[in-house]
Amino acid sequence: MSMTELERVELTCRVMERQFPIGTKPDWIDCTLANELLHYWDARRRELEAAEKPNPHMTIWETLNSANAKIERLESRVGQCEACDASLGVAIGTLRGDCRTDLRSHEHCNGTSGQCYFPDEPTTEGDQP
């Protein structure tokens, strides 16, 4: 009787787990290599199990509708992120303007006008520090 790939992988997983429990280090093998092998075979086993157990109650139409619903939710989230990004940009611009106005007002009150330097504004010579 021949074994399926899943059965071979499950057997390999059991042998690996018995031979190299996670965290142990045999003298003749690198511990990280043993752990990587364990993780590889465990992941392969889970992958094969998932492939063998499709949802029998889900038709292609239901699968497509489910995928479409997920896409719509993701598009909605992207739209929300873009709206937040735009709002944040407006808030940052307002804050920059308020800070500049306050600094210039402070300079004017102290009689030190023209000493503020904002790198993104055009300046005349002598305005830069």
Image (tube, rainbow, N blue to C red):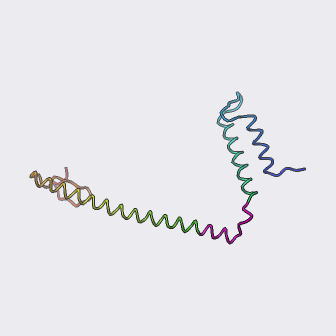
Give the left or right position of residue 41, taking residue 2 as reference.
Answer: left
Give the left or right position of residue 58, taking residue 79 as reference.
Answer: right
Is-magenta flag for residue 60? Answer: yes
Span highlighted in magenta in the image: 54-68
Give the left or right position of residue 107, taking residue 122 as reference.
Answer: left
Give me the residue at 32% from left, 61% from top.
91
Q: Which residue in the rendered view is the most extreme toward the top?
A: 27
Give the left or right position of residue 68, taking residue 86 as reference.
Answer: right
Which secondary structure class fits the magenta region best? helix
Q: Quadrant of residue 25?
A: top right
Q: Locate residue 43, reporting x and y percent.
A: 69, 48
Q: Which residue in the rendered view is the most extreme toward the bottom?
A: 61
Q: Locate residue 123, reporting x and y percent.
A: 20, 59
Give me the residue at 16% from left, 56% from top.
104
Q: Locate residue 101, reporting x and y percent.
A: 19, 59
Q: Nearer the viewer, residue 30 or 101?
A: 101
Q: Which residue in the rendered view is the most extreme toward the right?
A: 1
Give me the residue at 29% from left, 61% from top.
93
Q: Quadrant of residue 122?
A: bottom left
Is-magenta flag for residue 95? Answer: no
Q: Locate residue 105, reporting x and y percent.
A: 15, 56
Up the image or down, 7 lies above or below 54; here it is: above
Q: How many marks?
A: 0
Up the image or down, 46 lies above or below 36; here it is: below
Up the image or down, 10 lies above or below 125; here it is: above
